[in-house]
Amino acid sequence: MSYRGRLAPSPTGYLHLGHARTFWIAQSRAQARGGTLILRNEDLDPDRSKPEFVTAMLEDLRWFGFEWQEGPDLGGPFAPYSQSERVPLFREAFDKLRTTGAIYPCTCSRKDVLRASQAPHAGDDEVIYPGTCRTNSSPNANRASNWRFRVPDGETISFVDGGLGPQSFAAGTHFGDFVVFRHDDVPAYQLAVVVDDAAMAITEVVRGADLLISTARQLLLYRALGLESPSFYHCPLLTDENGVRLAKRHEALSLRALRQQGNSPDALRKGWTSDVQCVAAPK
């Protein structure tokens, strides 16, 4: 299959320079292979996703020099390209997981999980679920609960990352049962990204190193749903002067603010050459 990569921003704030660097590597890898780059608008969060951020996302990415061949503004063979319009696909996957007993309803609040004894944090700061509701296995339970994927405790999930090399995570130790559908009937990130990457025939996922453990979770979902997984390439994260990774709260480093300050994309990309050369692979 020909190379298909993707950019998958969430319109919950303005994109910052860290997003741009990771996306630039994604675009470079697609271009090096003569592949297709897809833009997907991950606007599932009804409370934080805003139309003005969607508009800004498209404008800022174009200004920075990104060129995609499929997306919410261009259409394509796998439309729609906004996740909020793809919920029936996520519900279909949810029903399959529920029928096979791979998920269970959970009535615990985040405070409940935090209060549970010996509830450590995963490497990506997600609290490891202590398994309080694991016995809730009825496939006919009300969906107005958080539905969690039952991880195979003790199984090691291994993969070779294109950027960071061999990776291994132990289910139940490095991460626990995770939410795939929220109590407010919103698909969770882990399920939505797996369903969409498979449906859009993505061959490689390029993203930040903070999502390495999420890859282990998602590989379990690919297997449970009978889907072929893409390859993965995780990039080191940009940090601020204090060594803190960039986030949308760093408004001064948003592409919108940098643009308004008169910066040019070429100047902002200065120093990224070695990264781009390092990821440029033959077709």
Image: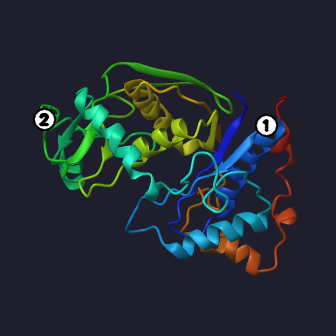
Q: Residue at x 39, y 51 (%)?
A: 87
Label 2 sits on what residue type? Asn
Q: Quadrant of the C terminus?
A: top right
In this view, 171 is above or below 247 = above
Residue 148: % across, % down: 27, 39
Residue at the far front in the pictured view: 77
**Tag 2: Cα neighbours inside 10 Å, few (<14), some, or many (≥20)?**
some
Q: Quadrant of the N terminus?
A: top right
Label 1 sits on what residue type? Val
Numbered badge on residue 191:
none
User: Would you say residue 236 is visible in this rendering?
Assistant: no
In this view, 49 is above or below 126 = below
User: Would you say residue 215 is visible in this rendering?
Assistant: yes
Q: Residue at x 54, y 69 (%)?
A: 13
- CA distance for labels 2 and 1: 46 Å
Is residue 67 rendered to the left or right of residue 227? right
Q: The residue tagged with tag 2: helix, strand or loop?
A: loop
Residue 166: % across, % down: 60, 23
The quarter holding residue 267 reads bottom right
**Tag 1: Cα neighbours inside 10 Å, few (<14), some, or many (≥20)?**
some
Q: Residue at x 86, y 48 (%)?
A: 273
Q: Which residue is mark 2?
A: 136
Is residue 151 rendered to the left or right of residue 12? left
Residue 202: % across, % down: 61, 37
In this view, 265 is above or below 180 = below
Q: Which residue is mark 1?
A: 279
Q: The residue tagged with tag 1: helix, strand or loop?
A: helix
Colour scheme in use: rainbow
| Nearer-N-terminus badge (2/1) | 2
Is residue 227 rendered to the left or right of residue 102? right
Of 173 and 225, nearer the camera is 225
